């Protein structure tokens, strides 16, 4: 697998050295992986295979040309085709990019237990055991259990003189139980993944048990009465909120292209209490959003999006950095070498505050504890999220369980309504990922501590 890429590198170097375009890059990848998916009693997917591919991207006279390919032996022809495409485009506004110092590095992700040495039978046995746990109650009508591993070798070369190679092992599972009692149907899911080996997915029996128990417990829970609540969001919901509702608004291509948003997302503007700080960092090796280098050959850095309540940064590619007069942040990412880089998040989280969980729940008085997340959507600054479950808070104590916890509001109003931030930040990342521009799922991680927010609308209407 690695030899197929290394064999082409001298030819890629020669093409880039001779190229007279404003900018050019070559990205190459070879990977092998296994996917096993069980649905109820059936093996839905059991696949194992190899892929290889590459792409050429050139900026020529202010216009981009992009070519993707599977046949690496024809790299000279593909490179020439990229020049031809860019020459045919006459852009009204010529694109420029920020040039960066060359990076010449080799990276690898450590794995304690090499999944390529694990027999397929053992992988199937592991996910089958979790699936058995998922259907442990008679009220659970169906399940879904997925195992996935991918070993990849990447090479990124560009006209700045960068040459980066890295080995990357990625492994994870996703577990779902769907319970039913009469007309009430209640799913519950959880997932975990990361860069490393088979150790990531071993010993997850407790996770499977929690998924099954939560699906069954929610059958008996009441739907939450609609209204405005003081809400304590757990670490996962806080993380999804900051990723979906705020993180995407911090992606500079979105800010630059949307005049309305650009007028809102002004650096230095207050967006939350002084205790609130939000960070995106690709340089966190244990997390799903880790990138040793982005897909433009830029090393990732920690970007403070909000610092002490003030908007302090945004996420950039080389192109958006040049357009907005800022520095690249190492956030140009593509779902594969066959796709063009877009401005994307990596590991995005609310930083720790000063309060412990118990004090936050006690301070909530009467309200709602919202935990986990099923799904949601955003429309510019408006959001709607469905929590995995909820619990009544009465006189500062956790009470009965609720289901159908749908939270909605304006992200900027909600950020300003944060009253307390916990000291127990956790990060999450699963086999799913982030989608943008038709590219997904792209591995990311998100998280935060418990947070207390006032005046959150739940259920869509007031009592």
Image: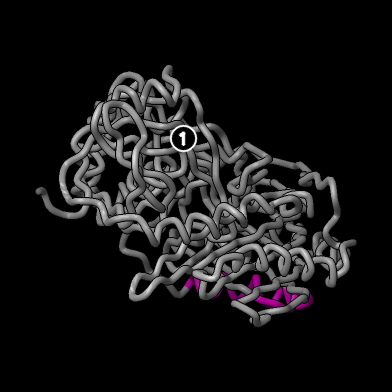
For the point 38% across and 25% down, the residue is: 421
- How has the structure been colored for display? one colour
Left or right of 44, for residue 215:
left
- Neighbourhood count class around disc 1 (C-alpha, 10 Å): few under 14, some 14–19, many 20 upward: many
As for residue 184 lying within the magenta part, the answer is no
Give residue 331's position: percent from left, percent from top.
51, 46
Task: Tell me which residue sits at (83%, 71%) in the image.
Answer: 120
Against 296, residue 415 (above or below) is above
The residue pinned by badge 1 equals 448
Quick check: 271 left or right of 47?
Answer: left
Q: Tell whether position 71 is magenta.
A: yes
Quadrant placement of the N terminus? bottom right
Question: How many dots with numbers?
Answer: 1
**Residue 305 in which image quadrant:** top left
Q: Main secondary structure of the magenta part?
A: helix
- Element type at mark 1: strand
- Residue 378 at least partly seen: no
Q: Residue furthest left?
A: 463
Q: Position of residue 108 (x, y in %)?
A: 78, 46
Mark yes or no: residue 69 visible. yes
Give the side of residue 141 with respect to residue 104, left or right.
Answer: left
Taking depth in this image into account, of 431 and 299 the one nearest to the observer is 431
Q: Where does the image place residue 355, in percent across and percent down from the top left?
A: 42, 19
Return the x and y of residue 99 as percentages of the image width and height.
54, 42
Q: Is residue 52 above or below residue 461?
A: below
Residue depicted at 49% across the width and 71% down the height: 87
**Numbered range of the magenta stretch:** 69-87
């Amino acid at each position: 697998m690695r030899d197929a890429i290394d064999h082409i590198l001298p030819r890629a170097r020669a093409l880039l050295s001779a190229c007279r375009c404003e900018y050019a890059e070559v990205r190459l990848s070879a990977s092998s992986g296994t996917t096993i998916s069980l649905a109820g009693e059936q093996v839905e997917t059991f696949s194992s295979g190899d892929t290889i591919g590459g792409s050429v991207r050139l900026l020529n006279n202010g216009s981009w040309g992009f070519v993707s390919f599977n046949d690496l032996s024809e790299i000279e022809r593909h490179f020439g085709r990229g020049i031809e495409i860019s020459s045919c485009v006459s852009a009204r506004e010529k694109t420029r990019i920020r040039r960066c110092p060359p990076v010449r590095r080799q990276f690898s992700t450590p794995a304690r237990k090499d999944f390529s040495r694990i027999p397929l039978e053992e992988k199937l046995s592991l996910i089958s055991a979790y699936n058995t746990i998922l259907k442990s109650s008679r009220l659970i009508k169906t399940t879904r259990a997925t195992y996935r591993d991918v070993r990849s070798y990447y090479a990124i070369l560009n006209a700045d003189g960068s040459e980066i190679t890295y080995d990357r092992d990625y492994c994870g599972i996703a577990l779902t139980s769907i319970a039913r009692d009469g007309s009430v149907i209640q799913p519950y899911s959880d997932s975990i993944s990361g860069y490393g080996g088979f150790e990531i997915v071993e010993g997850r029996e407790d996770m499977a048990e929690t998924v099954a128990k939560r699906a069954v417990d929610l059958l008996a829970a009441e739907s939450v009465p609609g209204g405005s609540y003081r809400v304590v969001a757990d670490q996962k919901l806080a993380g999804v909120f900051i990723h979906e509702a705020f993180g995407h608004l911090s992606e500079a291509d979105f800010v630059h292209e949307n005049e309305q948003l650009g007028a809102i997302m002004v650096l230095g503007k207050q967006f939350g209490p002084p205790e609130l700080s939000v960070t995106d960092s690709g340089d966190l090796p244990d997390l799903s959003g880790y990138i040793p280098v982005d897909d433009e050959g830029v090393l990732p850095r920690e970007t403070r999006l909000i610092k002490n309540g003030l908007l302090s940064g945004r996420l950039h590619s080389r192109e958006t950095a040049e357009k907005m007069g800022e520095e690249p942040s190492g956030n140009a990412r593509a779902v594969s070498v066959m796709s063009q880089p877009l401005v994307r998040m990596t590991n995005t989280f609310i930083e720790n505050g000063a309060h412990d969980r118990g004090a936050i729940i006690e301070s909530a008085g009467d309200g709602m504890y919202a935990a986990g997340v099923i799904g949601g959507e955003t429309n510019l600054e408006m959001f709607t999220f469905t929590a995995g479950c909820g619990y009544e808070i009465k006189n500062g104590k956790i009470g009965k369980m609720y289901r159908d916890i749908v939270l909605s509001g304006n992200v900027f109003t909600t950020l300003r309504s944060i009253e307390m931030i916990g000291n127990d930040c956790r990060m999450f990342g699963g086999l799913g990922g982030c989608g943008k521009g038709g590219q997904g799922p792209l591995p990311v991680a998100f998280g935060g501590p418990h947070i207390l927010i006032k005046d959150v609308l739940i259920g869509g209407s007031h009592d």
